[in-house]
């Protein structure tokens, strides 16, 4: 699973510099893989990305690529 998270992180870095901060952490520390997974699940639930059966991003909307990891992704209210 960790290998796939690295591939996802590389995808995010390639498509938008805003993803770089957390993606680089995920590639450095395996413990951060849950951070990436949680964000991807939220993006998927809101229809901003599609994941294949292996957890690899196969499509992402422009809104997903502009997401700022420094802010909450969606309000919990």
Image (spheres, grey):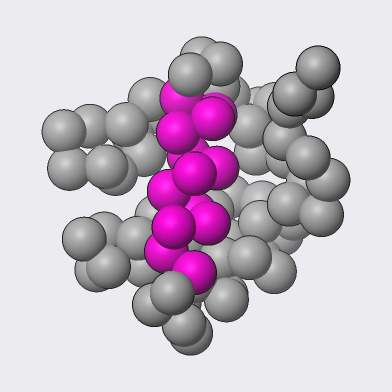
Left or right placement of residue 10 versus residue 4 in this view: right
| In-front residue for pair 40/52 | 40
The quadrant of the picture occupied by the C terminus is top right
For residue 40: magenta?
yes
In the displayed structure, 9 sits above or below 15; it is below
At 66% across and 56% down in the image, what residue appears?
19
* Predominant SS of the magenta segment: helix
In the displayed structure, 38 sits above or below 11; it is above
Determine the residue located farthest toward the front in the rendered image: 77
Q: Provide residue 52's location: percent of width, then percent of height.
A: 23, 32
Q: Provide residue 33's location: percent of width, then percent of height.
A: 42, 64
In the displayed structure, 55 sits above or below 22; it is above
In the displayed structure, 49 sits above or below 22; it is above
At 45% across and 33% down in the image, what residue appears?
41
Q: Provide residue 55's location: percent of width, then percent of height.
A: 27, 42
Visible residue check, residue 49: no
Q: Which residues are magenta?
A: 32-44
For residue 70: magenta?
no
Left or right placement of residue 21 versus residue 75 in this view: left
Q: Which quarter of the figure has residue 66?
A: top right
Q: Which quarter of the figure has residue 30?
A: bottom left
Visible residue check, residue 71: yes
| In-front residue for pair 56/34 | 34
At 78% across and 40% down in the image, what residue appears?
72
Number of numbered discs present?
0
Determine the residue located farthest toward the bottom in the rendered image: 28
At 38% across and 25% down in the image, what residue appears?
50
The quadrant of the picture occupied by the N terminus is bottom left
Left or right placement of residue 68 versus residue 52 in this view: right
């Amino acid at each position: 699973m960790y290998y796939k998270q690295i591939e996802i992180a590389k995808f995010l870095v390639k498509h938008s510099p805003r993803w770089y901060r957390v993606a680089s952490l995920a590639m450095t520390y395996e413990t951060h893989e849950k951070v990436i997974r949680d964000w991807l699940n939220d993006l998927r639930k809101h229809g901003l990305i599609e994941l294949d059966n292996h957890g690899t991003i196969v499509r992402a909307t422009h809104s997903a690529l502009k997401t700022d990891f420094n802010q909450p992704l969606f309000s919990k209210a």
